[in-house]
Structure formats: C-alpha cells, structure tokens
C-alpha cells in the first residue's frame, strides 16, 4: 500500500514538473480514459493539471481540440508500444499476426484497463463530424496497416481482407472485455488461428 502511494506521489511530482500544455494533456489522458470524454469538463481538467484557465485556453481553445490532441498522443504512444511488442516476437508473419492477440491480452491485463480510448470515444461522440472521429479513423487505419503489412507477407493476394478480419476480431475482443470481462483476447487468438489456417 505504501509503495502504491509512493508511486502515485512520484507520478504527481513528475507531472507537476512538466510545461503547462503537457500537464493538461497528462490530466486529460487520465480523466478522459477513466471517466469518459463527455463526463469530464474543462474545469475538472484545469484543476487536475494545476494550470490557470488562461493558460489552458492558450494551448487548447476548445475542449474538442484537447480531445483531438489527447487521441493523437495516445495513438502515437500505443502504436509505438504495439510495434515494439511485435518486433520482440520471434517467427514469421503468421506467428506475429497471432502475437497481436498476445499483446492485446497483455494490454487488457494492465491495471486500470477500461477498454480502447478510441472505441470509447467513438461511442461517446456520436456525431460523425466531430473532429475526434477522424482521429479514431486514423488510429484504426494505422492498426489495420500494421496487420496488412504482416498479412501481405503471408497472403499477398488476400492481405486487405485478412487484415480487416483480424481488426474485427481485435476490436470485438476489446468490446467483449469491457462488457463481460474475462480473457476474450485468447478466444480471439484461437479464432485468428482458424482464419489464418484457411486457404
């Protein structure tokens, strides 16, 4: 318990030393993911970041712009983690495509997992014209691009369809984990193995 409090205190100190814009993004990342975009007001982010309202609006003229910046940073960080995890895996494209679901299971097992920030945001922001929806599409396209590259090494003539099917399994496992808990990434991996075995 003392160790957890110490870790939280260290994290708060590290965040407090950041420039104002980064403090706002760090606070927004925690609050948006934990409580949701719609439930988190600008004043709550400002208070958590410990910045003046004027400073907040200097960097983020609107909440929408903050949500977009949060999703952009989250996408960059998550994709870097994902690619690094795949790079550590041994084997050919088939093994790496299956390792995608091992990484998913690892991510779901992290403390505080509350689903995918992009799927959550898409659910909350129903307006398809909301600027954050474009970031959701970009992130999904980037994920599918990684899978398409691997699928192209395995089945060049079927790479696009195969990657699309794997993304459906990937996102379906996330939704299932949020709705019902358990370890759906393992079930998705088995389904992916069957899909990859098809001729």
Image (tube, rainbow, N blue to C red):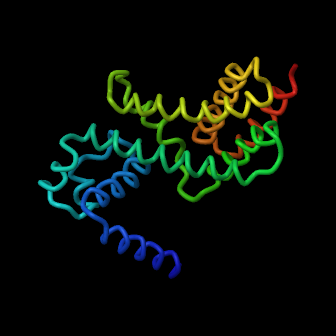
Q: State the residue at coordinates (47%, 37%).
A: 118
Instruction: Residue lying at the far bottom in this picture: please name it.
Output: 2
Q: Which x, y percent locates residue 144?
A: 61, 30
Residue 169, picture quadrant: top right
Question: From the image, which quarter does the C terminus lie in?
Answer: top right
Q: State the residue at coordinates (23%, 48%).
A: 42
Residue 177, picture quadrant: top right
In the picture shown, does residue 83 fall above or below 52? above
Q: Tell which of 197 and 154 is nearer to you.
A: 154
Q: Which x, y percent locates residue 170?
A: 65, 35
Q: State the residue at coordinates (22%, 56%).
A: 46
Q: Which x, y percent locates residue 55?
A: 16, 56
In the picture shown, does residue 190 fall above or below 53? above
- The mark tally for this picture is 0
Q: State the residue at coordinates (54%, 29%).
A: 141
Residue 72, picture quadrant: top left
Q: Tell which of 141 and 5 is nearer to you.
A: 141
């Amino acid at each position: 318990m003392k160790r957890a409090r110490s870790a939280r205190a260290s994290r708060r100190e590290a965040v407090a030393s950041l420039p104002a814009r980064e403090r706002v993004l760090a606070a927004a990342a925690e609050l948006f993911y934990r409580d949701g975009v719609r439930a988190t007001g600008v004043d709550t982010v400002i208070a958590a970041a410990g910045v003046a309202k004027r400073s907040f609006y200097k960097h983020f003229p609107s909440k929408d712009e903050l949500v977009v910046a949060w999703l952009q940073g989250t996408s960059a960080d998550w994709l870097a983690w994902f690619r690094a995890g795949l790079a550590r895996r041994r084997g050919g494209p088939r093994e790496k495509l299956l390792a995608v679901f091992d990484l998913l299971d690892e991510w779901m097992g992290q403390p505080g997992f509350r689903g995918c920030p992009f799927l959550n945001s898409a659910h909350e922001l129903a307006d398809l014209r909301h600027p954050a929806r474009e970031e959701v599409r970009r992130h999904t396209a980037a994920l599918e691009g990684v899978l398409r590259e691997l699928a192209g090494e395995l089945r060049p003539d079927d790479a696009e369809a195969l990657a699309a099917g794997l993304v459906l399994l990937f996102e379906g496992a996330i939704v299932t984990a949020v709705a019902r808990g358990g370890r759906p990434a393992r079930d998705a991996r088995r389904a992916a193995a069957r899909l990859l075995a098809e001729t």
